[in-house]
Image (cartoon, rainbow, N blue to C red):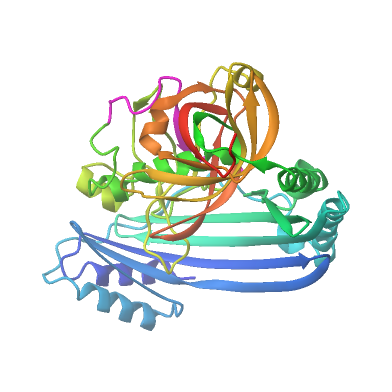
Amino acid sequence: MITKANAKKILDITLSSGADFGELFFEDTIESSLKLENGVVSKVNSGNVYGCGIRILKKDKCVYGYTNDISMKSLAKLATTLKDSFFGSKEYEVKPLKLVKSSNKHLPKIPYEKVSQEELLSLLKKAYTAAKEYDEKISKVDVGFSYDNKKITIFNSDGKIVKDQHTRGRMSIVVIASKDGEMQMMHSGPGAQKGFEYFKDEIDVVDIAKQTAKSAITMLLADECPAKVMPVIIDNGFGGVIFHEACGHPLEASAVSKNLSPFANKIGQKVASEVVSAIDDGTIEGGWGSGNFDDEGNKTTRNVLIKDGILQNYLIDNFNGRAMNRDGNGACRRESYKYQPTSRMSNTFIDNGKSTFDEIISSTKYGLYAKSLGGGSVNPTTGDFNFAVNEGYIVENGKIAYPVKGATLIGNGADVLLKIDMVGNNLERAQGICGAASGSIPADVGQPTIRVSSMTVGGRGGK
């Protein structure tokens, strides 16, 4: 992609007007997608994302630019344009460039490039048939599959050369159930930073499709959820999206360093119930948001954010860490070379507790069991949120009584953390795409089943 000697020449330019740090981020990504709509192939796409981003830092100032022309002439021109944002003489030298060793533990066993389109289509058709034939009220099924193989190389003026590779695949199953003019949609999106072996050997796409169809039918026939303040039991897996959105983002240095977070300056303080521990772990093998390195070239780590209710740490990138007098802790990410990197989550989850699922249900006299959550909105500065419940059930006298639809969870992330009174032992993670300043990135959310002692539930039911 570029020689070490040429990389040093470009880095020399970045430091020539008094900057203290320069960085080159090269990316070469092959991506492909396939979609079936009602059993018919409707889309086949492929592409190549290829280019370089250059970042220059001087104390608390940063400039960034990118190009898909990685010739020396183009890179030198871009670096010169960016360094002219600073005024001064050269104060720092580029340290000798040296490759940082990598564990390379996320490499696929069956690369997607070696899987035929016929085999991918067969996988999608199995999922389509399983969902479509589940019930006559299933009116539409869309099944998609996408994968990408991303190779990155980072050079920086601190002397690092970092190389990493990410191979991710994900299936999307959208099921719509209809009756008497009413419709209900459900979605499942299993994925991993693995090759085709994940879909071939590790999960059952037919069962996932059937469960998605079952949920759609159940919610189609469900009563409207009553609106009231009540205990809420949030299931494992994608239920962790509330922590991700309402608590995870405020724990990122991009917010904390500017005092735009309710968790700013609270290290060592109680911010959650004592039964809550929360972790962001970018080292999980095969994790959707994992990597050997982050997008600044720091090795990914397991960051304990909250331990037994006490705030332990933030998610820090090198640049925002300057304002906090803290080094980055492997939590800097970006969508592609077109985005300036910043602090982001990887695989973020509430850790296992001691209660079983049955104990949580049986100890609840009345409340809402939110089995599946959908979209929502969050104010990252305050942590105020509202989330739709895709699949919900009323719990009465310690038993799951009947399904309800149209429920919305309304609250504040910091407040909810303090009201979690039971945490299950059935931790699961689920895959999502997280959008923020540095683009849309793959991120795992997760938790065991938890119970929030009191939460505002919106709905149109009257009971």
Magenta region includes residue 285: yes
83 with respect to 40 (left or right): left
In this rendering, is residue 41 above or below 222? Answer: below
55 with respect to 323 (left or right): right
Magenta highlight range: 267-286
Specify whether residue 330 is in view.
no
| Residue plotted at (44% across, 67% down) | 337
132 with respect to 345 (left or right): right
| Residue plotted at (85% across, 54% down) | 126
In this rendering, is residue 321 above or below 60? Answer: above
| Residue plotted at (35% across, 49% down) | 380
Specify whether residue 217 is in view.
yes
The percent position of residue 322, horizontal first and vertical second, equals: 22, 48
The percent position of residue 76, horizontal first and vertical second, equals: 32, 78
The percent position of residue 114, horizontal first and vertical second, equals: 76, 61
Judging depth in this view, the residue of 153 and 122 nearest the camera is 122
Q: What is the quadrant of the C terminus in the image?
A: top right
Judging depth in this view, the residue of 247 and 285 nearest the camera is 247
| Tally of numbered tags | 0
Overall secondary structure of the magenta section: loop
Magenta region includes residue 2: no
In this rendering, is residue 28 above or below 237? Answer: below
In this rendering, is residue 55 above or below 256? Answer: below
401 with respect to 59 (left or right): right
Judging depth in this view, the residue of 76 and 245 nearest the camera is 245
Q: Which residue of the protein is positioned furthest toward the front in this rendering?
A: 462
The percent position of residue 383, horizontal first and vertical second, equals: 36, 43
Judging depth in this view, the residue of 123 and 285 nearest the camera is 123
